[in-house]
Image (tube, grey):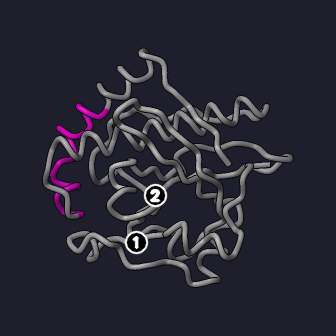
Amino acid sequence: MSFNYKPSKYVLDKVREFAHKRVKGSSALYSSRGEKNLSKMEEDIIIGTLGEYAVQYYCKTIGLKCTRPDLKIYENRRKSFDADLTSVVRDKEIKLHVKSQSTNSIKRYGLSWLFQKSDSLVKSPDDEDMMVFCSVDPKVWEVTIVGFVHPKLVCELGLWGECSVPYYRHSKLAIYLEDLEPYAIVRSELI
């Protein structure tokens, strides 16, 4: 699949403002997860949020209604592993969990996406859960949707891997595209 999304200036400005405000209120949470660099935290939030906008736009282009990315700032204790977006596919609500990786990170670690070990997608995903994997080029802020994967298949096949970055290993697991491809479980489309 190769669906590309380039945000408008309006969306990019909104996402940057959101990231800046969120870092101010969540730096302690990110620090506990292994990240201490404030500018890296802000860039990670921009990358993740742009992935959500790309998925919402993709759903719209294929004729599906989809919720908008949530730009509210929550207290650390109110954060959750709920889906980023929801859509309805063939009269069934699908919970879309969007994971994005920067092209800089791809060059260092390969196409991979990180999950908290305590995330329900890792432990006990629902039938309605769908993971959506994206890559984001921070030089031009363009998003590519790589594919869609049911987390139950990842669990059944035992494809959760160790995180390449040592200081994230205490709290995160990874999924590597190269581990998914042999099983042909990265779907090119949502429907």
> Which amino acid does the dot numbered 1 rest on?
Ser
Relative to 162, say whether 110 is above or below.
Answer: above
Specify the quadrant of the image occupied by residue 18: top left
Q: Residues within 10 Å of mark 1 (few under 14, many from 20)?
A: few
Residue that label 2 marks: 81
Residue 118, numbered label = 1
The residue tagged with tag 1: helix, strand or loop?
A: loop
User: Which label's residue is closer to the chain start, 1 or 2?
Assistant: 2
Relative to 148, say whether 84 is above or below.
Answer: above
In the rendered structure, the answer to whether residue 43 lies left or right of residue 116 reads left
Specify the quadrant of the image occupied by residue 127: bottom right
Verify whether residue 178 appears in magenta: no
> Which amino acid does the dot numbered 2 rest on?
Phe
* Image: magenta residue range: 19-33
Q: Position of residue 60 (x, y in %)?
A: 70, 30
**Residue drawn at the location 46% of the way across and 58% of the way down:** 81
In the rendered structure, the answer to whether residue 140 lies left or right of residue 191 reads left
